[in-house]
Image (cartoon, rainbow, N blue to C red):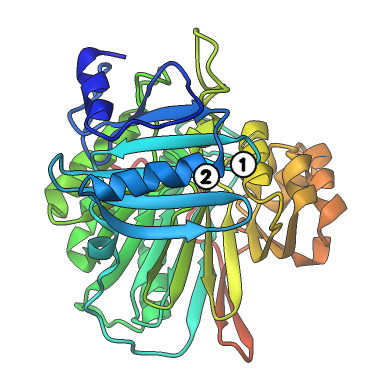
Amino acid sequence: MTTAERDLFESLPPYEGGTAAEPVFNCGAGLAVETAAGSAEDSFLKCIDGTTAEEFLRFCAALAQSGLTLDNADDNDDLLCREYYDEKNRQIVYTYYSFAQRRARILLDRSSCRLPVFCASGLPEKRADTALMQFGLYYNTMDSGTTCDCGMCYALRLHDNSVVLIDGGEYEQATDAAMDELIRCLRHMTGTADGEKIVIAAWFCTHNHNDHMDVFSKLIRFHHELFDVRRVMFNFTSKTLLDYDNACTDRMKTRLREYYPAVLFKKLHAGQRFALSNAQFEVVTAHEDILPDAYDETHLYRGMNETTTVLKIMFEGQSLLLLGDSETRNGEALRRNYQNRGLSCTYLQAAHHGINKVEEIYAFIKAEKVLMPQCRYINERSQKENFAVLCRYNDLANVFFAGDCTRIFTITPEKTVKEVFPVVGYHYDGSEY
């Protein structure tokens, strides 16, 4: 930990109890483009081991007494969570306690806006239903520059007629025809006419791999005038923790700042709960949950997939659980964060396009339907062993493949209406992205 990083935590009241774990971790920026040394808006994580809930709550009381403003609190049988605003240092202090680990985590978040600001809408409620779309991407074997076997794109239309857009496929899937079809489907979901902007309440990205952001990045480059993008939320790790040269991340951030300079950003942390329109959001786990245990002095994560943020969205008495590309250690954190409450959902996005077994996740989560961001052929042939694990805990009749078609579920508390549209787009057409 550098002197500057130590000074950041010394601005807080001391944590009385437990043992401070070493080192302090740089947990990444928001919309700032990072270098190998990080950025000016990086977040930092300090862990306290062997502590108690009572010690944690005394620390929270000290934060409030020191002048920090409590923006949100949520306590349950697994986690105690607090979010404060530190006006003097212009940062979010997010802290949570895990009963299972007897560990407190303290995060200095220097890139996020305050939760009350982030959630303020200003849009009137226009409808009484919610629509969930699994957009049909073209999947094939991985052949760089031609086709790919991954990617996922989801959208949730809310009561105020805004849309939460989730991830997006790889550039091979972002053909001009596919982009036009995505825009058409978003207009269909919202009923917006040509010339009327589609409001993106938030773009959520599970993790910063190409196949989860290239479609969105192309969308805002070539069609930014069609959209009003109001919020962005993700939790990408720092380049100081995971050595990656990922041009798609810098490209996305640069375009957001160019086309939507007023966009609000929120870095998501485990235990956070908030609402946009009629949808409630709950952060199930983020990459900080596997720190410091993943630290072995040579590397921290086995790969980018381990940095996935798992998010649950609740609406109309139903829910969508987004696993991104979760792997084993994400599953361990997920089960730990919900070991007393359990975890269930209506729609479960299958992890990592069906490429991972992650039996510990599928055995733990109770799901009614599975949304598979993959084509049927790959799941049932080259990934058949992994797919068999998923089907061990879920009925194949309730598994919906994104490679089959685009599906839109329009949901009210009384009923769900399904619409189906064909996949548009084939091999990569060479268009810019």
What residue sits 51% from the left and 51% below the top? 80
Depth-wise, is mark 1 or mark 2 nearer the camera?
A: 2
Disc 1 marks which amino acid? His
Residue 100 in sight here? yes
Q: Up-down: is 284 above or below 157? A: above
Label 1, residues with CA under 10 Å away: few <14, some 14-19, many ≥20: many
The one nearer the camera, 181 or 348, is 348
Left or right for 214, reference 87: right
Viewport quadrant of the C terminus: top left
Q: Up-down: is 204 above or below 189? A: above
What residue sits 22% from the left and 73% below the top? 197
Q: Secondary structure at mark 2?
A: helix
Viewport quadrant of the N terminus: top left
Q: Up-down: is 146 above or below 133? A: above
Tell me where residue 322 appears, x and y as whole percent. 56, 54
What residue sits 68% from the left and 38% below the top? 355
Disc 2 marks which amino acid? Glu
Label 2, residues with CA under 10 Å away: few <14, some 14-19, many ≥20: few
Give the label on residue 352, or none. Answer: 1
Mark 2, residue position? 54
Q: Quadrant of residue 126?
A: bottom left
**3D distance between C-alphas at marks 1 and 2:** 38 Å
The one nearer the camera, 310 or 155, is 310
Tell me where residue 283 appears, x and y as whole percent. 49, 53
Q: Secondary structure at mark 1?
A: helix
